[in-house]
Amino acid sequence: MKRKRFTNLFGFTLVLSCIFLFGMSLITPYSAYGAKKPRVINIGLIGDYSGPYAPLVGVTRPGTVDAWQYINGELGGVNGVKVKPLLRDMSGKISLGLSMYNEVINTKPKPTFIDIYITPLSEALRERYVEDNTVGFHAGAVVSLYPKANAYAVYPLYPEQVGVVLNWIRKNWKKKRNPRVGIITWDTSYGRAILIDEFYKYLKKIGVDLVETQLFGIRDVDVMAQLMKLRSKKVDFLVTNTAAGGPLTIKKGCKGMGWNVPLINSAGSDWGTVNLSPGLFDGDILFMHTKSFDEKKDKSIKTVMKYYKRNKRTVKEKSIFYFIAWQNALIEHKVMSDIVNKYGWKGLTTKNIKRALNRLKNFAPLKGLTKITYSDDRRTPRVGRVYTIKGTKIMPQTDFMQVPDMRPVKYR
């Protein structure tokens, strides 16, 4: 009888122990690397290296290779462990990008971060990061970031970028009337990212009149009809949120009409676009949240260019996305190193990574390439500069400035 009671008690205790351990597994943060020092750390990067975004976004591939070469070599990786970027080309095809994500996220050890710069793809994956217990870096579109989950932006929201440029124009405007602007942008989640109420309200606040909005397809090569409507409204500036072929199509159309009107853009009019037709974009204005390739005496640019030249990069690799790849790698390196130093390898969890990112304030990769601040409620960087284009050079017109907060009210 005593033996039977003992057996029952042992069984009951075993069941309770299993329930307890299972419960603890649900609340204890999971680290893909366990308590021991891993052999390698994986970082996922899915980009468009051969599709419509490739002239800009494609440069994240060499930028990522060069940045981790610098970190693994000169900085010793993350506490002596080298980081391996898992590079995938989704060619601008969302279905292919989703398939590649499923492959990358199931790599062992599971990637600590996933870098994705294509807005429609990042929009589709925002909620998956929670399910898969990882952190994603995305483009600056509301649909990619909110409602907040595990995603952070690599630059300010698109309307915040364009808003800084328009505010700068307004402050330097000499005429008595308000400047008139017309929007011509892609009919995609990226192109439409500036078409939000907060942007419209900001224009009214600073005294800029939006008189017309026209959309076109990402693969359209003729926008004459849209430009004719905008010209009839006598706009002083065109505004777009496109990259590579988008600005090129707009400016070719303007030239064909004999219409010399400046084009305002987010970072989509950087070197990757300008080098498609040098001289065509002279006088155009854009926003970038990093320093410029053309600031050759800057220390952060010198460090980047050492690897750019060492690995024989060409003019085709000149894009802000080359800098963004460095920026992301250096943020990831800092966050992971700080966590491992404080908690050991078992502490490298998504919960701790998010906590560290949310406390990042004025982090300056390479001591000045840009300035990055995140918080739990606002998942985007806060500063940037206004630039103008001359030939193939992009030169700053301002120092780093705070961007307006254009998060929709429901996400503040």
Image: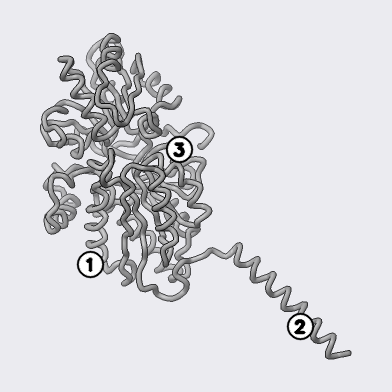
Residue 82: image location, x then y, percent: 30, 68
Q: Which residue is mark 3?
A: 143
Find the distance from the CA under tag 3 to the CA under tag 1: 37 Å
Viewer-side residue, 384 vs 242: 242
Q: Which residue is mark 2?
A: 10
Q: Amino acid at mark 1?
A: Gly
Against 227, residue 277 (above or below) is below
Residue name at image x 36 percent, y 66 percent: 41
Image side of residue 42 versus residue 387, left or right: right
Q: Nearer the viewer, mark 2 or mark 1?
A: 2
- The tag on residue 162 is none
SS at circle 3: helix
Q: CA distance from mark 2 to mark 1?
A: 55 Å
Q: CA distance from mark 2 to mark 3?
A: 53 Å
Disc ID at residue 73: 1
**Nearer-the-camera pick, 70 or 100:** 100
Q: Position of residue 354 (x, y in %)?
A: 46, 54
